[in-house]
């Protein structure tokens, strides 16, 4: 699938203003960053979420962080580990 085919015309027509589009892109970027951070923590710990732990360190909730990007400001959920090494 080509990148330009990812969104249909019907999907794109729901955005009536530039603010609507920027709000959607901000949410999309927020979800993407959170997914990347989860993957990095999985790699750091050596196992996937809900997997069997290989040591005494594990995922221990999430913290909130405010970030700015080209679409505005948003709050992301940053995963934390018990030993605070991530």
Image: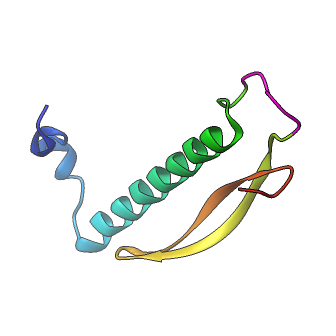
Q: Quadrant of residue 54?
A: top right
Magenta segment, principal secondary structure?
A: loop
Task: From the viewer's side, name the closer residue of 65 and 25.
Answer: 65
Residue 74 inside the magenta-drawn segment: no
Q: In this view, does 49 lie to the left or right of 1?
A: right
Task: From the viewer's side, name the closer residue of 28 and 21.
Answer: 28
Q: In this view, does 70 lie above or below 12?
A: below
Q: Is residue 10 above or below residue 68?
A: above
Q: What x and y, as percent, mark residue 53?
A: 79, 27
Residue, x 49% and y 56% (percent of image)?
A: 33
Residue 52 inside the magenta-drawn segment: yes
Q: In this view, does 80 lie above or below 9?
A: below
Residues in magenta?
51-56
Q: Is residue 19 left or right of residue 54?
A: left
Q: In which quarter of the image is residue 8?
A: top left
Q: How many marks?
A: 0
């Amino acid at each position: 699938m080509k990148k330009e085919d990812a969104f249909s015309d019907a999907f794109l027509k729901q955005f009536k203003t530039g603010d609507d589009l920027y709000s959607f892109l901000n949410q999309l970027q927020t979800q993407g960053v959170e997914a990347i951070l989860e993957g990095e923590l999985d790699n750091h710990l050596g196992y996937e979420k809900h997997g069997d732990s290989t040591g005494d360190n594990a995922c221990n909730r999430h913290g909130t962080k405010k970030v700015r990007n080209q679409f505005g400001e948003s709050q992301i959920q940053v995963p934390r580990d018990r030993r605070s090494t991530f």
